[in-house]
Image (cartoon, grey):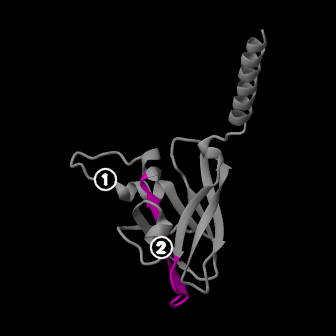
């Protein structure tokens, strides 16, 4: 009888712990997204910005394949990364294989980097949309660095559409 009580008690304790653990888990889209961002030196009132794009980010909503098996990055980038200045003008992204502004260890497992130029001291809003069909996106507001070059791991906050 004592053994039965011990087994039932152990099972109840295990079930309670499992319930507590799973009730405290957040869905992946509810967490902040950390994004490695590198800032270049200011020249002529502007600076270069680099963002590391990982394979995990691409796999969430990959670009559709073409008949020639090439990727459609020109269409994919502006759907997933939107950078606007304070007047609402949208920056144009360029794709490159390496970055002089983000060290490999800081980039994580970067598939490639996206780059653009921004004005030093101006306010910007970066939106990252992991899956265009989903109803969530992440937002980060910042000012163009005036004392670059530099690096930060920006925490993009979840925003509902």
The picture places residue 79, in percent across and down from the top left corner, at 48, 54
Residue range corresponding to the magenta coloring: 39-55
* Residue 11, picture quadrant: top right
- Locate residue 14, reporting x and y percent: 71, 27
Residue located beneath label 1 in the image: 71
Looking at the figure, which quarter contains the N terminus? top right
Which SS class for mark 1? loop
Q: Is residue 73 left or right of residue 90?
A: left
Residue drawn at x 42%, y 78% is: 100
Task: Label 2: state its secondary structure.
Answer: loop
Percent x, y of residue 33: 60, 55
User: Which of 104/9 is in front?
Assistant: 9
Q: Which is more foreground, mark 1 or mark 2?
A: 2
Q: Please indicate, yes or no, whether residue 61 appears anywhere in the rendered image.
A: no
Residue highlighted by disc 2: 102
- Find the residue positioned furthest to the front: 2
40 within the magenta span: yes
Circle 1 crowding by C-alpha within 10 Å: few under 14, some 14–19, many from 20: some
């Amino acid at each position: 009888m004592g053994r039965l009580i011990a087994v039932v008690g152990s099972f109840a304790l295990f079930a309670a712990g499992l319930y507590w653990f799973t009730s405290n888990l957040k869905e992946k889209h509810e967490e902040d997204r950390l994004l490695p961002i590198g800032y270049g030196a200011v020249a002529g009132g502007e600076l270069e910005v680099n963002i590391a794009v990982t394979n995990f980010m691409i796999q969430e909503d990959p670009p559709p394949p073409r008949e020639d098996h090439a990727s459609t990055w020109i269409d994919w980038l502006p759907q997933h990364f939107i950078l606007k200045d304070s007047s609402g003008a949208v920056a144009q992204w360029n794709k490159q294989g390496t970055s002089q502004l983000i060290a490999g260890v800081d980039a994580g497992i970067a598939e490639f980097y996206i780059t653009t130029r921004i004005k030093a001291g101006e306010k910007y809003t970066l939106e990252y949309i992991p899956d265009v069909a989903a109803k969530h996106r992440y937002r980060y507001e910042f000012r163009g660095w005036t004392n670059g070059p530099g690096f930060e791991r920006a925490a993009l906050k979840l925003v509902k559409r």
